[in-house]
Structure formats: structure tokens, C-alpha cells
Image (tube, rainbow, N blue to C red):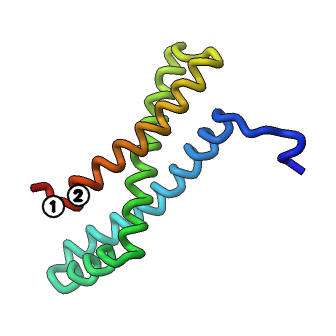
Amino acid sequence: MLGQTYRFQITTVMSFLHRTSGVVLSVGALGMAWWLLAVAQGGEAYAKVSACLASPLGMIALAGFSLALVYHLLNGIRHLFWDMGYGMSIPELYRSGYAVAGLTVVLTAIIWFFAMRGGA
């Protein structure tokens, strides 16, 4: 069993999540294309897509997309620092991993706070 012989490290989890968020963003790009096509088709098509996205399942999909987008962006910035040779010691790897995880939650919550307020 994996749990008895290997303990997951934050670096393993962050790597897995980075790949997963990339897949989610790829699927989300198809959703964005669907939305853009509806905008181009006019009012009736746009109303159907908007209703779908405003449904509970649509809101969950949008929340997942935004969470993946923020995480992938922040973890990508973390990787850029690694490419420049910064943050490669074990304590720095852990610190930056926890920072990315925390900032992902905070920034996604801020985005949704303003989105649900209607920007007012």
C-alpha cells in the first residue's frame, strides 16, 4: 500500500495539482469558446448559456475554473523563480508551496466576492 511505504510531500501534491489544473483549464477553454460562440450568435443563444452558467452546476464549474486559473498562475510564477535559481532549498520549497496554496484560496475568494457583488 502506498500509505505504508510513501508519505506524500507538499512538492508531490503541488506537482499533481499543477498538472490537474492545466487539464481543468484546457476543458475550461472549451467552455469559454462555447460562451464566445453564444455571444456571437445573439441574444437567445447567449441567454441559454448564461442560464446554464448561472445554475448551481455551472457555478461549481466556474468556481473550479477560477480556482484552477489562480493556482496555475501562482504555481507557474513559483516555477519561474526556480528557473532563475531562487527558492530551491527544502525549507524554501515548502514555504513557497504553502504560500501558493494559501494565496490561491484567498485570491479566488476575493475574485468570487467581487463577482457575486456584481462589481458594485
Position of 65 relative to 34 (above/below): above
Q: Looking at the rendered structure, which numbered label has been put on residue 57? A: none
Residue 113, image x, y percentages: 26, 54
Residue at 90%, 51% in the rendered image? 1
Residue 84, image x, y percentages: 49, 15
Residue 40, image x, y percentages: 19, 73
| C-alpha span from label 1 to label 2 | 5 Å
Circle 2 sits in a helix, a strand or a loop, which is it? Answer: helix
Q: Quadrant of the C terminus?
A: bottom left
Give left or right: position of 109 versus 115: right
Q: Quadrant of residue 18?
A: top right
Give the residue at the far left of this rendering: 120
Camera-nearest residue between 52 and 43:
52
Q: Which residue is mark 2?
A: 115
Give left or right: position of 24 versus 120: right
Kind of residue indicated by mark 1: Gly
Kind of residue indicated by mark 2: Ala
Residue at 38%, 54% in the rendered image? 66
Camera-nearest residue between 33 and 19:
19
Circle 1 sits in a helix, a strand or a loop, which is it? Answer: loop
**Do labels 1 and 2 touch, CB within 8 Å?**
yes
Give the residue at the far bottom of this rendering: 44
Q: Which residue is mark 1?
A: 118
Residue at 42%, 67% in the rendered image? 60
